[in-house]
Amino acid sequence: VVQRLRHAGAHIVGKTNMHELSFGVTNVNTSYGTTRNPHDPTRTTGGSSGGSAAAVAAGIVDAALAADTAGSIRIPSSFCGVVGFRPTTGRY
């Protein structure tokens, strides 16, 4: 995916924080710290891909890649007030 994005002219900024093993709804990461919601740092970003949602919500990036185990894109995007897209099963 990254190779295709680069080929299309995208600039890869870096990696974002996520819930360990991409499985959780709090985005608490004991190794790298908990990702905070950019709209209210006392709140969680939710989901395992909360770092991606937080980066978009904070305006650091225009778009981000994420993994969706069981709402891991949709939960953080809703918590952070951005759009999250999960393709239909079989289309990714």
Image (spheres, helix red, strand yellow):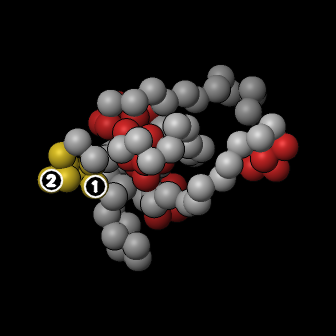
Structural crowding at the residue carrying mark 1, measured as other residues with C-alpha within 10 Å and reported as few (<14), some (14–19) or many (≥20) = some
- Could you say whether the residue bearing mark 1 is in a helix, strand or loop? strand
Task: Tell whether 55 sits left or right of 88.
Answer: left
Whether pointer 2 and pointer 1 mark residues with C-beta atoms closer than 8 Å, the reply is yes
* Residue type at numbered disc 2: Thr
Identify residue for label 1: 36
Instruction: State the residue at coordinates (34%, 70%).
Output: 33
Q: In which quadrant is the N terminus drawn?
A: top right
Task: Tell whether 18 sits left or right of 89.
Answer: left
Instruction: State the residue at coordinates (28%, 47%).
Output: 38
One can see residue 33 in this view: yes
Q: Residue 35: horizontal and vertical position, in percent?
A: 33, 58
Task: Tell whether 27 sits left or right of 5.
Answer: left
Task: Tell whether 73 sits left or right of 25.
Answer: right
Instruction: State the residue at coordinates (55%, 27%).
Output: 85
Between 56 and 90, which is closer to the camera in this rendering? 56
Q: In which quadrant is the C terminus drawn?
A: top right
Structural crowding at the residue carrying mark 2, measured as other residues with C-alpha within 10 Å and reported as few (<14), some (14–19) or many (≥20) = few
**Quarter residue 71 falls in:** top left
Identify residue for label 2: 42
Q: Residue furthest bottom?
A: 31
* Residue type at numbered disc 1: Arg
- Could you say whether the residue bearing mark 2 is in a helix, strand or loop? strand
